[in-house]
Image (cartoon, rainbow, N blue to C red):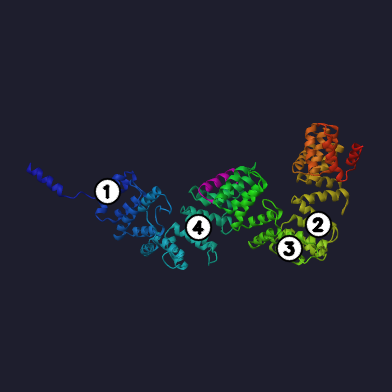
Amino acid sequence: MIKNLTKWMQGKGRPAPLPTPADLDAAFARQDFAAAIALTRQLADEGNAAALYRLGEVFEHGLGVLQDFGQALEWYEKAAEAGFENAWAKLGDFYLAGRGTRSGEGADADKAGAHRLLDMLSVQPDHAKALHWNRKAAQAGQAAAQAHLALQYIYGLGIEADRDEAERLFLSAAEQGSVLAQRCLGMLYAGGEDKAAQYDLAERWFRAASEGGDAAACMALAMLIINGHAGSGTDEDAYHLLGKAADEGNVEAMLYLGSLYRDGRGTAQDLSVAETWFRRASVRGNRNATLSLGFLLTEMIEPRDYVSGASIFREAAEQGDPVGQYVLGKLYLAGLGVPQDDEKAYGWLAQAAEQELMQAIETLAALTAGGRGVEANTSAAIRLFERAAEAGSIDAPYHKAMLMMGQTQPGAADDAAIIALLKESASRGSAAACIQLGVLCASGERLAQDYDKAARFYASAAKLGSVDGLFNLAFLRLQGLDPNPADARGGIALLEEAAAQGHGPALWALHNIYREGRYTAADPMKADFWLAEAARQGSAAAATRLAERLDEGGQGALPADVTTADVLAWLEQAALRGDTGAQVRMGLLYAGGRYVPQDDETAFRWMHGAAEAGHVFAQAWMGDVLFRGQGVIRDEALAMQWYAHAAAQGHEGARAALGSTAQ
């Protein structure tokens, strides 16, 4: 018994063997955190620096314990004091960025208590301490610390900013494989406040970081490619890079990936997928994605979803975004997705204008001039246009000039100021100002008549993309008033150029030129071609003329590639847009039952719309059917009112009807 007791006592006095790093790794790998922490503490109690560091990681990441950055910091400091270099770098990182949530001001008692608890578990930034530890770790060759120290030099955090030293540190860390340093070098070389962009170097380091799996670098490299700054890479490459970054949760990449799907760059256009990516970025707080989603719904997706778009822009507007406020105001002006309301439109636009959004100021000026949503005030409108001009609007001086022209007669003292404003706007790139200057030169109003100058102004407008500039220049040339050159063929060529861009007046003019044989030989086939093209592009006059030909000669009177159904569809579209000539022709078709079912009620509706808009024939027709009770209840008094409207415009039949009833 004594022998056994002696053996037991000898065993009791011998220290238990310490766990090995492999023991710790195995426990953490099987997520047995209780055992892992106990084993780690055993080593830490013996002063093992790596174990001390590992306990810091336990509390930093909440591995089997409550996440506590304060406790993590304590363990990292102990490891640092024990000479563990990784701990030096970790402390530099902790003190540079801070860790955890800090309470805000004005919280209620319950929230303040919760915030105090969170503060106890957090670490506040301390750039001086960050500088100490980052510098110590950087000197030991720690790549992460070199990158963090470089960031302190870039932004002047705890030390005077020094771009060259930052670049040296980034290079050292990048060459050791630090993706953070590689990405930051890319950003440094992509262009800064005091250095010209070195896109070749930016591309090199963005590529290195993206190959290392850095999502932000993938996005940055994609943007270099998209913007044409990369030495190699296609839109398709950019698409794949953005996809990688977006899949890693990079919100900016989600936005730009949506843009590629919207525009069909690097991948097939898919507005539905674009919408999905914009929504993903939007719900993560990206305001540009929210706005892009709104524009997608209201300007691209068919059918347009103005209701959802208005809701999205309202959300942005209520959060103070000036673009959201501006677009919501425009939607109220048009009654798209919201009830038409000039006053609400003015209110939202005014909020955007307060933030100096140029487009909002300019629109507000136009509303003030026209008395929409606010009492008309030309002086106030002029002041707003002046603000818009100061904010960079190219057209604001033009609009101010046009308001001044409306208040003065040619030859007044303001002529010089008006011309100066128009020239200023033209110099900024306003096509509208160029055209107005051309009109004044051609007419001799407020300027000496000079067709040569008029032609130059119209040509300038055309170079700025104005199809109206081409159209006006064409007629100067057709009439021999453009000295360089002055020929009919050149004028027709300009009209054809404008027509190719869908310019309705040019299409209609070409039809009439070939139909009437003006400026060139008559050509019925060409006249029919341009007539059909004008109708396809929405010309109400062309649709009405085709309807007249159909009424007079049937299908055989139409151009070869135009059907009766085409004519009826174009005519109805023009009528729905409010063209009174088209409305009258629709009314006559339904009244006579030609090519459409005979329908007095529909005929009356179309004619009534035209009559209300002042069409004299429609007014007289309304008088006739109401007086006779033709398809409607007879109403002699109302018939006389319509006859009176038509007679006031010189309609002889209406005058005769009024005279006969008076007798």
Q: Is residue 608 above or below residue 324?
A: above
Q: CA distance from mark 2 to mark 1?
A: 90 Å
Helix, strand, or loop for circle 2?
helix
Q: As rendered, which of 308 and 295 lies closer to the eye?
A: 308
Front: mark 2 or 1: 2
Front: mark 3 or 4: 3
Q: CA distance from mark 2 to mark 4?
A: 52 Å
Q: Are marks 2 and 1 in contact (CB under 8 Å)?
A: no
Q: Earlier in the sequence, mark 2 or mark 4?
A: 4
Query: Is 38 situated left or right of 211 in this image?
Result: left
Q: Are marks 3 and 1 in contact (CB under 8 Å)?
A: no
Quadrant housing residue 549: top right
Which residue carries the number 2 mark?
474
Mark on residue 39? 1
Helix, strand, or loop for circle 1?
helix
The answer to whether residue 9 is seen in the rendering is yes
Q: Residue at x 67, y 52 (%)?
A: 374
Estimate the x, y position of residue 137 in percent, counting from the top left. Answer: 36, 62
The three-letter amino acid code for the residue at tag 1 is Leu
The three-letter amino acid code for the residue at tag 3 is Leu
Q: Are marks 1 and 4 in contact (CB under 8 Å)?
A: no
Q: Earlier in the sequence, mark 3 or mark 4?
A: 4
Q: Earlier in the sequence, mark 2 or mark 1?
A: 1
Which residue carries the number 3 mark?
422
107 magenta-colored: no
Residues in magenta? Answer: 267-286
Task: Please tell me how crowded label 4 is: few (under 14), some (14-19), or many (20+) other residues with Cα within 10 Å.
Answer: many
Which residue carries the number 4 mark?
206
Q: Residue at x 72, y 57 (%)?
A: 465
